[in-house]
Image: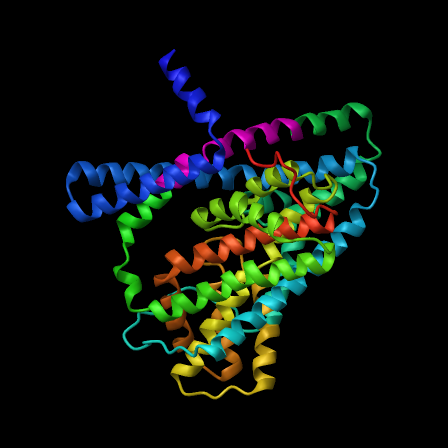
């Protein structure tokens, strides 16, 4: 009975309140464990990190099959009345938003030029794209991926392609088949809602592990580049995106923007994965009253191609490398960098650090060798505890913002908060 009362008290509080409380508790435990360095506290921090990893793992596990079934079921069971038009609008918003974000990154880099300490940084031994064509080719081949492999590896472009193809052909199936996919869709939605209720515990573990393992010492030497990146991405979230919302809706954009940042951005900040945050965004779209024909497709698509934060990171880091090497950048090259950063952002994978491996692509514009570029990537991983978290929060919350306004939702309903 006491346990049941505890559960009821936990569920009675709003989800955001629970997340904030657990965030603070996790940070305190991580800081104390790192400072005192005793075996019990180290063990507690390790267990908390395990809880955080389990939460992220649960999101990543359910997201691919959820997206596949939701899209398939939506196409099989629903009569479309504007979903296609809405999707076209969302894709345009994704592309425009990512390009404007890359322009923001370039502008901030010119306003606050930054240099990096490249000597002595160990290169990251991971492959990186060498041209825009490679990025586009990879995206194209993802479309024709084996469906089982696409679900197993979280290839959302392939998942969407197969779900649409099967959904169109199964529209001619019998009612029992259609009802089956509808029932599976409902069941998976309930599983996701259960996992989302565990978000405070997951955030507690993720924050505790991050503070315990990294602290702030590793970031002191790169404070300037961190500040430039964060300020540029915050500008995108609080200025660029609201302007886009206002242009489309002609209404005050901030209620919708703040709701998406609060209910999507917070979890994305700690999971550091747009792909892992897909179930959270799908649930938020449902609460906002977004067109059910639209968001099952636009949200996973956004986790793949809507990468404004990634475009900022690629542009800022590439220009920081150019400044360090004394390379002057003219207007034409800066404009080309905006395009390349936007395309690179669209090709960034929705996983932690996904944008960093595209930095060499942008560095190639300035003739910077791959060895130097990979040192910049290494710096990106060092500051990733902040950079990647803010980037993912911007990317993932923007997916919901653009989907909502494309669906005609300009302001959140009063009961959108859990």
Asked where in the image residue 118 lies, by quadrant, the reply is bottom left
Q: Is residue 361 above or below residue 95?
A: below
Q: Residue furthest front?
A: 252
The mark total stands at: 0
Specify whether residue 136 is in view: yes
Q: Main secondary structure of the magenta part?
A: helix
In the rendered image, residue 275 lying in the magenta stretch gets the answer: no
In the rendered image, residue 197 lying in the magenta stretch gets the answer: yes
User: Which residue lies at the image location 64% right of the left edge and 41% below the top edge?
Assistant: 285
Task: Locate residue 99, reporting x and y percent.
Answer: 62, 68
Asked where in the image residue 141 lies, by quadrant, the reply is bottom right
User: Which residue lies at the image location 82% right of the left edge and 46% below the top edge?
Assistant: 82
Seen from the viewer's position, the closer of residues 121 and 263 is 263
Task: Locate residue 295, reporting x and y percent.
Answer: 68, 44
User: Which residue lies at the image location 45% right of the left edge and 66% below the top edge?
Assistant: 229
Asked where in the image residue 409 lies, by quadrant, the reply is top right
Task: Locate residue 199, reporting x and y percent.
Answer: 45, 36
Task: Locate residue 28, reporting x and y percent.
Answer: 28, 43
Left or right, 198 with reference to 144: left
Q: Is residue 300 above or below residue 194?
A: below
| Colour convention of the picture | rainbow
User: Which residue lies at the image location 67% right of the left edge and 64% below the top edge?
Assistant: 96
Which contiguous range is marked in magenta? 185-205
Left or right, 271 with reference to 39: right
Specify whether residue 144 is in view: no
Q: Is residue 308 above or below residue 210?
A: below
Q: Is residue 88 above or below residue 61?
A: below
The C terminus appears in which quarter of the rendering?
top right
């Amino acid at each position: 009975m006491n346990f049941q009362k505890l559960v009821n008290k936990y569920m009675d509080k709003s989800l955001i309140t629970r997340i904030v409380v657990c965030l603070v508790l996790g940070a305190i435990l991580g800081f104390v464990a790192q400072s005192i360095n005793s075996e019990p506290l180290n063990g507690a921090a390790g267990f908390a990190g395990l809880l955080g990893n389990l939460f992220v793992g649960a999101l990543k596990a359910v997201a691919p099959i959820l997206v596949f079934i939701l899209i398939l079921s939506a196409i099989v069971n629903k009569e479309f009345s504007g979903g296609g038009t809405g999707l076209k609008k969302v894709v345009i918003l994704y592309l425009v938003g990512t390009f404007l974000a890359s322009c923001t990154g370039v502008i901030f880099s010119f306003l606050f030029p930054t240099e990096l300490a490249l000597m002595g940084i160990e290169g990251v031994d991971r492959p990186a794209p060498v041209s825009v064509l490679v990025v586009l080719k990879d995206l194209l081949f993802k479309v024709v991926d084996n469906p089982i492999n696409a679900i197993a590896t979280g290839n959302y472009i392939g998942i969407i392609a197969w779900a649409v193809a099967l959904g169109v052909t199964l529209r001619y199936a019998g009612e029992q088949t259609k009802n089956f996919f509808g029932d599976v869709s409902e069941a998976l939605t309930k599983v996701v809602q259960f996992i989302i209720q565990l978000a405070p515990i997951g955030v507690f573990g993720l924050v505790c592990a991050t503070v315990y393992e990294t602290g702030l010492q590793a970031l002191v030497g790169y404070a300037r580049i961190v500040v430039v990146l964060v300020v540029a991405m915050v500008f995108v979230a609080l200025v660029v995106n609201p302007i886009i919302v206002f242009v489309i809706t002609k209404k005050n954009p901030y209620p919708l923007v703040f709701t998406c940042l609060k209910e999507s951005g917070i979890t994305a900040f700690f999971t550091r994965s747009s792909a892992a945050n897909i179930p959270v965004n799908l649930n938020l779209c449902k609460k906002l009253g977004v067109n059910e024909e639209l968001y099952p497709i636009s949200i996973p698509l956004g986790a793949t191609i809507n990468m404004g934060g990634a475009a900022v990171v690629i542009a800022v880091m590439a220009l920081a490398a150019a400044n360090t090497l004394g390379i002057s950048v003219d207007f034409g090259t800066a404009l080309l960098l905006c395009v390349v950063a936007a395309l690179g952002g669209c090709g960034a994978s929705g996983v932690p650090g996904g944008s960093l491996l595209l930095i060499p692509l942008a560095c190639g514009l300035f003739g910077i060798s791959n060895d130097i570029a990979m040192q910049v990537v290494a710096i990106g991983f060092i500051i990733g505890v902040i950079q990647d978290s803010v980037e993912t929060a911007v990317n993932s919350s923007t997916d919901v913002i653009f989907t909502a306004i494309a669906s005609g939702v300009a302001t959140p309903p009063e009961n959108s908060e859990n």
